[in-house]
Image (spheres, rainbow, N blue to C red):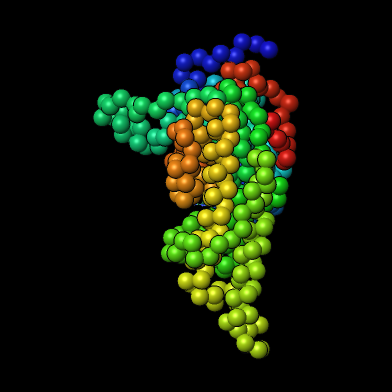
Amino acid sequence: MDDSRAVEGFTILAIETSCDETAAAIIRDGRVIIANVVSSQMALHERYGGVVPEMASRQHILHIAPVIEEAVAALPGGFEEIHAVATTYGPGLAGALLSGINAAKAVAWARGLPLIGVNHLEGHIYSNWLIPEKPEERRAREARGEPPPVHEPPQFPLICLIVSGGHTSLVLLRGHGDYQLLGQTRDDAVGEAFDKTARLLGLGYPGGPAIERIADGGQRGRLQLPRAWLKDSYDFSFSGVKTAVLHQVEARKSHIGSGKEERARPLVELDPQFTAQLAAAFQESVVDVLATKTAEAARAFGAREVLLAGGVAANQALRKRLSQVVEVPVRYPPLWLCTDNAAMIGAAAYYRYEAGLKGWDLTAVPNLRLA
Ligand code: KG4
Ligand code: ZN
């Protein structure tokens, strides 16, 4: 393998198309966000209550070229300024991943640049290395002649809790690229549990933000839902609490309905107070288990920091609870870096490049594992 030390100002074009966001970013020195373009398909998939894989692939193919062009336009020298191209190659939807991989290969081949494949989960973890300054904020600051914000990179060893629509993993990092998977979900991912529960309650998609919003109106402690502790393991399980919500909804329906009238009653007619209490109880149960196990892992492995990553890291109740129970600093990215984006892929790619991890034998690996 040739020498892979990144030169100063090393600039990566990163691409992310593993699910329902078509994204491209320009990342400098692994931490500075020069461009961050995200074209979301959320509105399209919303009416189906989840991501439709074939539609996602088609949308990626339609949007990937303009999204890349918009990102590269942030560089005065355009493609000339790029040192490497990175793309997510798994886990994710096969067709969706392929659109990003093909686009990355095309650019890298045409420009004679190295190609770096990134695990989507690794990307979520490395969102915590990015200096959380939007490109327009950075330009405005530079125009004022002010220095960049101080943002120390995370300190190893650390524990990262990855919580997204497809994953729930507790990971120990001893150094860059040195991952140990401590535990993961045995059934639903936590975001998936939020989405399915929101559906049961007649709330919209994506379910996480909908549940969080409505849970604020539900009085805490009025309703208790079960917690799956799975003793002596860092694994998680969320299907039980979701089923408990279903039972509560069904019991309520048969309680409020009578005779024939009951069958015609849609879920959305659950009274708002009850729905809010159920949403609050669900969120409390999930947050309790996630935060408790993360705090235990941090203690057991002497972590200097705890990182939160993935779409569910946007949840304020989870952030608050973690900072209460974890004894070391808890770090999480700003909201706009929690959900899928290509900036995080560029950050992870930088450290992979430095470790000599690049090459052309890149293909979509839908069930790619982290460790
Ligand atoms: O990381 P992400 O954007 O996509 C995946 O790679 O899965 O995560 C999306 C997931 C969805 O399940 C969504 O419901 C959840 O993150 N989510 C939230 C919140 N915002 C997004 N879950 C709980 N609370 C939130 N505020
Ligand atoms: Zn994600």
Residue 183 in sight in this render: yes
Q: Which residue of the protein is positioned furthest toward the left in this rendering?
A: 144
At a point 54% along the width and 38% down the height, the residue shown is 295
Residue under the point 51% across and 71% down: 274
Residue 129 percent coordinates (x, y)? 48, 29
| Location of residue 223 in the rendering, given as x and y in whole percent from the top left corner | 53, 65
Residue closer to the observer: 332 or 227: 227
Point 43% across, 60% down: residue: 216
* Quarter in which the C terminus is drawn: top right
* Residue at image point 67% right, 56% down: 239
Horizontal and vertical percent position of residue 245: 61, 64
| 166 lies above or below 333 | below
* Closest to the observer, 12 or 220: 220
User: Which residue is at the front of the view, 124 or 55?
Assistant: 124
Q: Observer-nearest residue: 195 or 10?
A: 195
Outermost residue, front direction?
Answer: 231
